[in-house]
Each structure stands twice: as structure tokens, then as C-alpha cells.
Image (spheres, helix red, strand yellow):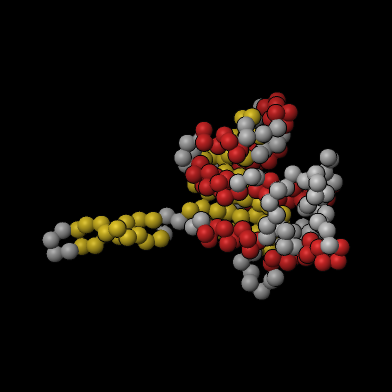
Amino acid sequence: MEKPMNSIRSIRKDWDLIESLISERSRVLDVGCGEGDLIQQLKKNLHANVHGVEKDQGLALKAIAKGLNITHGDAEKDLFQYANQSFDYVILSQTLQAMIEPKKILTELLRIGSKAIVSFPNFGHWKIRLQLLLLGKMPITEGLPYSWYDTPNIHFFTLKDFENLCKEMNIVIESSIGLTSKGKQFSLNNTFLPTNIITHEAIFLLSYKNFEPIKIKTTNKMFAKNSAIIN
């Protein structure tokens, strides 16, 4: 199904915000990279060392034809092949809602990369709520343009759902950006805004909490207690 122009513009905005969260010359893995347009952008603008994984063989071959380092593979099955902390950033753009096991995928992203960048459409947006209220059927919007019977999305969740999952998994939200349906961006940390209602799409920069042993000095010797402090 061909994506409408407003959806393409939305994706481009999403990519620009993802780029803004990445340091120059970083090692970057894009999971579900499609034809490689995002990693091509990161390679050009940030001089990043870019790699990609794509499930669709046709899209993967198109990316390889562009000279990009792309692996044809299924993110739900093949990420184990990447070593721990082998990338600075691992990106999952507009794909988490299509994963069978989102929680497992988040764990893998932060095993492979020091940081993860995840973006997704917000099912708590006011247009979706209004369609459910007035029409009583699964909504179709700019961010979720498919009918219920042919959508690739199998998990619908809101900002609050995602934030609660991160808390449960001890994942640190280092930065979070919301986009309205008009493309206006704002910080999701702004408590004065009803973020779960006005956010059309969200981009999160994630990492794990780092723990260090607490060293306790006694009159006899110094030893490390089985406790930890959070950086």
C-alpha cells in the first residue's frame, strides 16, 4: 500500500529528530531500515558508521544497491547475532507497534547499543479517541492509515503505556520529543501540556541505569558492599 504524502512528510520529520539525538561519527544500527534512506542521511550528515537490518528482502537489496551495509534479517529472530554494546545507538523507527514481542525487542536494542532511539505513533491522540467515541470502530488516521484487517500494527499503545513499560524495565528516558499532527514539536517533559492527547508521534532516547558498587571503609580494610548507586 502506497503511503500518502502527509505520511512521508511525517517520516522525514521523524528522521530529522532522530538525527538530532545522535552524536557525530557514532556507530549506528537501524532496525527495520527499509531501503536505507535514514542511515544514508545519518552517514551523509553525521559521518556515522551506519548499519541496517531489514526483513523485506526486496527493500534490503535496494539498500545494498545504494552501497549501504545492510543485512537481510528478521529483528525478532536475528538480533542475537550482534555483540553486546557493539553500537552507540540502535534505532527502531515507527516499528515497535508491529513487533510481536515489544518488551523483548527493547531489551535487545539496549543490549546491542549504549542508547536506543524509538519512535512510534501515539494511540492516545485525540483524533483516535474521538473516532472511537463517535464512530465506535477502529480509527484510521495519518499516523495509523490502515484498516484493522490489513494493518501491520499489532500492538496499539499510548505514551503512558510506553513510559510505564520503561519504568518497569528500569530504562532511563534521557530525552523525549512529541509531534502534533501538524508537525509541531515539543518536549514531552512539559507537564503543562496534555501530552498524551496532543502527541501524534513520539521519539524517545533511551538507556539503562548504570550501577556502581558502594565502597565502605572500615578500620580494618575497605570492601564493597552488595549495594549500588545510580549514576
Residue that appears at 67% across and 34% down = 55
Q: Is residue 223 above or below residue 45?
A: below
Determine the residue located farthest toward the right in the rendered image: 135
The image quadrant where one finds the C terminus is: bottom left
Would residue 218 be found to the left or right of residue 105 on screen?
A: left
Residue that appears at 55% across and 53% down = 206
Q: Is residue 83 above or below residue 20?
A: above
Q: Is residue 83 visible?
A: yes
Count the marks.
Answer: 0
Q: Is residue 40 visible?
A: no
**Residue 105 point in image, percent of width and height:** 57, 45
Would residue 94 be found to the left or right of residue 7 on screen?
A: left
**Residue 69 point in image, percent of width and height:** 61, 30
Q: Is residue 219 above or below residue 13?
A: below
Residue that appears at 57% across and 50% down = 103
Instruction: Judge by depth and name the residue closer to the eye, 129 or 218.
Output: 129
**Residue 8 point in image, percent of width and height:** 79, 46
The image quadrant where one finds the N terminus is: top right
Instruction: Judge by depth and name the residue closer to the eye, 198 or 55.
Output: 55
Would residue 79 be found to the left or right of residue 5 on screen?
A: left
Residue that appears at 78% across and 52% down = 144
**Residue 173 point in image, percent of width and height:** 55, 58
Determine the residue located farthest toward the left in the rendered image: 220
Would residue 96 be found to the left or right of residue 207 on screen?
A: right
Instruction: Judge by depth and name the residue closer to the eye, 180 or 47.
Output: 180
